Image (cartoon, helix red, strand yellow):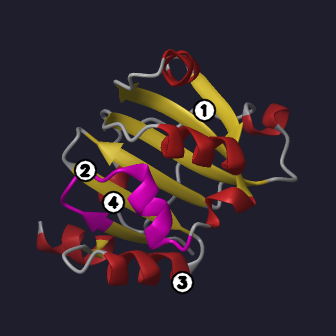
Amino acid sequence: MVYGAIYEKNEYLINIFESIKNKQTKYNWLITDCVCYPKSPKIEEKLNQEYCFISGEELTEFISEESFQLIWAVFSAFDKSIELSDILKYSLPYADGYRGFWKKPLSIQHPLAQMEIVSWDSTLTLLFSKNKADIDSFLKYYPKSELLESYIDGQ
């Protein structure tokens, strides 16, 4: 089962990770469909590709080095035991134009991912997780956020 939350604000990753109790280091991350404008050439070069695959530790280092706005992006979290070659057997997740965010039952785009963080048009933050505790923690951290299923029902 997949759980989801929506926050009608574009949020910095450092805060999102804090909201889920900094679990990002437990995963490797596939970053796709990323449109952002960091000042650091190192970060820009890394993210300005079809995809970027980095450890949670390296991602934490990036966001600690510079806080930058994400316009579009999908951050997919994978257990560290999963190889990139296995991940790339599937389509790359995307944010811009993906209609599945707004359909029930909720799902994570990549079938091997445990969690997905989406920056949507620099206006929304979406969190999907197979772990309900992540969503509960996010909702508590962001009191103006709501369960994605409730949001979809209200549309």
Instruction: Measuring from the top left, give residue 151's x and y in whole percent.
Output: 21, 71
Cβ atoms at labels 3 and 1 below 8 Å apart: no
Left or right: 102, with 33 as reference point: left
The amino acid beneath tag 4 is Lys
State the extent of the magenta-drawn residues as a range: 6-21
Q: What residue would you read off at disc 1? A: 91
State yes or no: residue 17 in magenta: yes
Q: Residue furthest left?
A: 155
Q: Distance between the Cα atoms at labels 2 and 1? A: 25 Å
Q: Distance between the Cα atoms at labels 4 and 3? A: 21 Å
The amino acid beneath tag 3 is Ala
The amino acid beneath tag 2 is Asn
Numbered disc 4: secondary structure: loop
Q: What residue would you read off at disc 3? A: 133
- Any mark on residue 10, and which? 2
Numbered disc 3: secondary structure: helix
Q: Distance between the Cα atoms at labels 3 and 1? A: 27 Å
Q: Nearer the viewer, mark 2 or mark 1?
A: 2
Residue at 55% over, 74% down? 21
> Badge 2: few (under 14), some or many (20 or more) residues near its Cα, within 10 Å?
some
Q: What residue would you read off at disc 4? A: 103
Cβ atoms at labels 4 and 3 below 8 Å apart: no
Q: Name the N-terminal-most of marks 2 and 1.
A: 2
